Image (cartoon, rainbow, N blue to C red):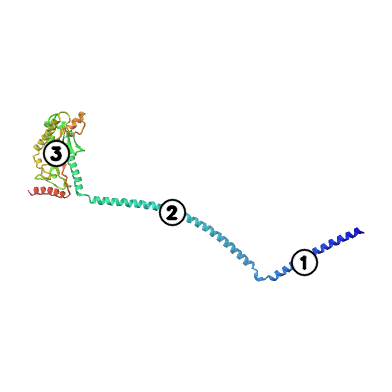
Amino acid sequence: MRGGFRTRYREEEEESAFVSMTDMTVSFLFIVILLLAYFASQYSDKNMVPRPDYERVSQERDDARREREDARRQIMRLQMLVSQREATITELREEIDVKQKEIDDLRHEVEQLKQELEKLRKIDPLETYLALSAVERRRILETLRDQLKVDFPDLEVVISEETDALRFQGDGLFATGSFSIRPDRRAIVESIATRLAQILPCYTVGARSNWRPACNPGNAIIEALQIEGHTDSTGDFTANLALSTNRANSTFSVIVGKSPELVEFLNFRKQPVLSVAGYGQMRPVKDNATKEGRDTNRRVDLRIIMYTPSKSEEIERIKDALTASTLRKEAN
């Protein structure tokens, strides 16, 4: 009997627990219903958006997002282009700096050239005169050489580069140890006299002067036309000096005998331009240790010395002297 009571008591407890849970569930549902009722009371049609408007706004939003993305990409491209352009600008500026330096260097060079040109324009007339005189001396020597080569093809005659003299090998005019011109070579010296008589009038003053701008445009004037005798080192020094002087004198005598008027050609100081000098063995042009050298050293040189003005003012005086001689001759 006691067992039946316990069973019934347990069943009553279980039934009581079920009733409690049911009450709780009902209470919860009641609260939910109340909340739904509250939210429903707050609902209004004014807060609703029509479907077409919603889709339009959504489309505009998507379009705006795409445009923003496109704009961002465009900005990135522009930023890249700007960077490239800035790099290009930097390179161009560097090139400009280099070119500017080159331009500055060229301008400096041009300025230097202008200064040099200005110096040339202001060149001392005396320097110009001396340069032209040197050119005329060379031209006289070359003319004599070429004319003698035509008259005597076998004659050994050269222009000395160191003294600007016309050089004849000594054994060509004289026998060894002799100062008498060989009879078969006398015509050479006489030809020289004839040629000098044709050339000197344009470069000297005096009664025989015949200066013209065409033959002497630089107004050069000869100071001395020197016949120089030389020997080799064989023999006595003093004897060689006398021998060379005698050879120069013999050549002078033949020249003047052929063209006596040559002594009348005067320099700027009114002195005869024709002169003689003997140097013996003192001025060799070759080594006396060889026969060829000794043959060359036994020679006669015809050296032309041009007048050298000491100052620019003399240049006009030289021109006046040359012109006056020509005018006197024309007047006579």
Query: What type is the residue that disc 2 sits on?
Result: Thr
* Figure quadrant of residue 271: top left
- Give coordinates of residue 81: x percent, y percent: 48, 56
In primary-sequence order, the first of circles 3 and 2 is 2
Question: Which residue is pictured at 18% across the width and 38% down the height?
Answer: 165
Around disc 1, counting alpha carbons within 10 Å, would you say few (fewer than 14), some (14 to 19), or many (20 or more)? few
Marked residue nearer the N-terminal end (1 or 2): 1
Q: Which residue corresponds to the image point at 70% horizontal and 71% vertical from the top-left?
A: 41
Q: Which residue is mark 2?
A: 90
> Could you tell me residue 62's position as x and y percent?
59, 62
Please, what is the three-letter code of the amino acid marked with disc 3?
Gln
For marks 3 and 1 on the same chain, the one whose residue lies earlier in the sequence: 1
The circle drawn on residue 27 is 1
Residue drawn at x 36%, y 51% is 101
Image side of residue 79 versus residue 244, left or right: right
Secondary structure at badge 2 equals: helix
Q: Are marks 1 and 2 in contact (CB under 8 Å)?
A: no
Nearest the camera: 314 or 187? 314
Residue named by callout 3: 226
For label 3, count other residues whose C-alpha is less than 10 Å away and answer few (under 14), some (14-19) or many (20+).
Answer: some
Quote the CA–CA distance across marks 3 and 1: 156 Å
Q: What residue do we see at 17% from left, 37% from top? A: 166
Answer yes or no: do the residues labelled 3 and 2 have beta carbons within 8 Å? no
Pair 3/1: label in front = 1
Q: Amino acid at mark 1?
A: Ser
